[in-house]
Image (cartoon, rainbow, N blue to C red):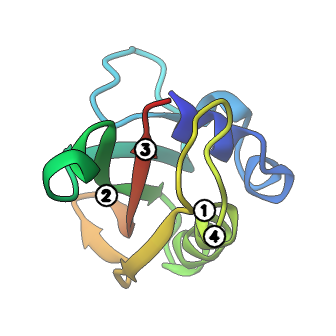
Amino acid sequence: MALIALLKANGPLVAALPAAGAIKEAEWRGTNFDYPAIRLDITGGGPQGNGACAEGWTGVAGSVIALSKEDSSGECLTLLGLIQDALQRKHLPGLAALEVKIDSTTYPFRELNLWRGEVLFATTVIQT
């Protein structure tokens, strides 16, 4: 996926993780799960524009989730900032796409034994 490739290509983000392999899709079902971790969740998409303008234009929306098992939310906050820097106004590698736009970022919240925060984004992919 182009979005995962974009995140894995970001040196500061990868440096804050155990390895680039800690960046995966949200539905990843592996057995080796290390923290901190980043998960990409595509939440929606569909044609954009009207009439002939809609042909070949697809909107994509989703979130990048930061997960941390630290006692403090600080690590999760740092990851959220790095995710924002990795995505904001970037183009997806290998695709004709408009810039990724950040819609909002949630403050980390406690979920069972970990901190979770999300960067919500949207972009448009143009089929050429």
Tell me the kind of residue under disc 3.
Val
* Circle nearer the viewer, 4 or 3: 3
CB of mark 2 within 8 Å of CB of mark 3?
no
Going from N to C along the chain, the mark reached first, 2 or 4, is 4
Q: How many marks?
A: 4
**Tag of residue 89:** 4
- Residue at position x 71%, y 33% in the image: 20
Q: Which residue is mark 2?
A: 113
Mark 4 or 3, nearer chain start:
4
User: Where does label 3 land, which residue?
Assistant: 125
Labels 3, 1: front one: 3
Q: Residue at x 59, y 72 (%)?
A: 84
The amino acid marked with disc number 2 is Asn
Label of residue 87 in the image: 1
Q: Is residue 43 visible?
A: no
Label 1 residue SS = helix
Q: Closer to the camera: disc 2 or disc 4?
A: 4
Marks 4 and 1, how far apart at CA: 6 Å
> What amino acid type should be assigned to the residue bearing mark 4?
Arg
Q: 109 or 88, which is in the foreground?
A: 88
Which of disc 2 and disc 1 is earlier in sequence?
Answer: 1
Q: Is residue 11 above or below residue 80?
A: above
Spatial separation of the CA atoms under disc 4 and disc 3: 14 Å
Residue situated in front as seen by the camera: 110 or 2: 2
Q: Quadrant of residue 48?
A: bottom left
Mark earlier in primary sequence (2, 3) = 2
Location of residue 19 in the rendering, given as x and y in whole percent from the top left corner: 73, 34
Q: CA distance from mark 2 to mark 4?
A: 33 Å
